[in-house]
Amino acid sequence: MRKGLLLYNPTAGRYPVGRFVRGIIHPLKDAGWSVDIAETLSGTHATQTAHLAAQEKYDAVFAIGGDGTVGQVASGLINTETALAVLPAGTTNVWAIEQGQKPFSWFQWGALRENAKILANVEPQYVDVGICNDRPFLLWAGIGLDAETIRKIEPRPRFFKHLSVPHFFATTVWEATFWHGLDLRVYADGELVEGHYLVAVATNIRHYAGGMSVISPDALLDDGEMDMWLLSGDSLADTFRHFYELASGRHLTSDIARRLPFRTARIESDANFSIQVDGDPVLGGHTANISIQHRALKVLMPENALQLLKTPKR
């Protein structure tokens, strides 16, 4: 019998999920899983609990939460044989949305059970993990305006999580009023690019900006490569233009957006900058070193999402 751990933070997300957690056990048991439940107290605790589950030879950790939780749990499972399975219930759920999963809400209160059923019997896959200044990430690592915004709004009370999109947009506009970008030196696989940018973001997935943008439509989760997007500009008007182009897909041919595929990257600035990984603020500095651990994380993902992989196991 396979052994799974249901891991959740009772204070995270827009909606309290605690009363629904035990309902997930039945579809997993019906599929041949034995299930334990653990609450987490913080992001660090989530990482530690996931790592302990790997040491105790759990087959999977079912992480109930959003993108922050996904990154935290993934950090504890890298280079182990314990798989990450995501049951989306967070403020933002871009990892799950990319794979076609419906997040839990009061209007989708059965989503946790349905996602558990979907993942219960899938073939495990392997995906790449990014490392930014020794901090693992599964989705993105960014500096500039997005990191400044996230630094200001996280952690946020549950009330603001219900207004996550307008709250993020309003905070970004406010920050952009005073934020004029950074002079950056970006090394991507040894190639140097210099310029003045509002945002520099490394992405392992296709979606960005809370799922509103398909920033890298051809990204694959297991190809050993990521995209570095450099969004130039120095004004609020430039920020609004980037919003429009990212939402409409016009950034792909824009003269103020540049894509650099890479395997290793280094970002430098004479000015101090903030950093975000998977939508969580982390310690900034003058340098961000980014590398890729190829196929370092075992995951359970829906069968209809295997097109996101270069070499899926069927």
Image (cartoon, rainbow, N blue to C red):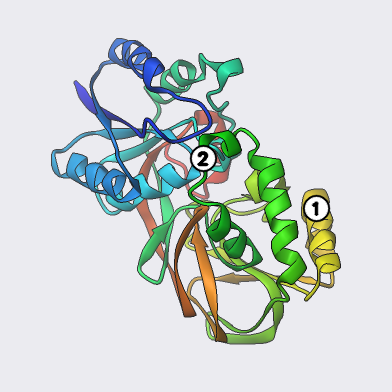
Q: Is residue 278 visible?
A: yes
**Residue 114 placement, left or right of 232:** left
Q: Quadrant of residue 64?
A: top left
The x, y position of residue 231, in whole percent, is: 72, 70
Residue nearest the observer in this picture, 295 or 269: 269
Q: Earlier in the sequence, mark 2 or mark 1?
A: 2
The x, y position of residue 57, in whole percent, is: 16, 38
**Residue 210 placement, left or right of 275:** right
The x, y position of residue 34, in whole percent, is: 21, 19
Q: Quadrant of residue 177?
A: bottom right
Residue 157's tag is 2
Amino acid beneath label 2: Pro
The x, y position of residue 178, in whole percent, is: 73, 71
Vertical order, 269 against 25 (above or below): below
How many other residues sit within 10 Å of disc 2, few (<14), some (14-19) or many (≥20)?
few
Instruction: Give the CA distance from mark 2 to mark 1.
Output: 32 Å
Q: Are marks 2 and 1 in contact (CB under 8 Å)?
A: no
Amino acid beneath label 1: Gly
**Residue 14 placement, left or right of 258:** left
- Seen at 47% across and 78% down, the residue is 285
- Seen at 79% across and 56% down, the residue is 243
Residue nearest the observer in this picture, 262 or 90: 90
Residue nearest the observer in this picture, 185 or 226: 185
- Seen at 42% across and 26% down, the residue is 119
**Residue named by callout 1:** 249
Does dot 1 land on a helix, a strand or a loop?
loop
Does dot 2 land on a helix, a strand or a loop?
loop
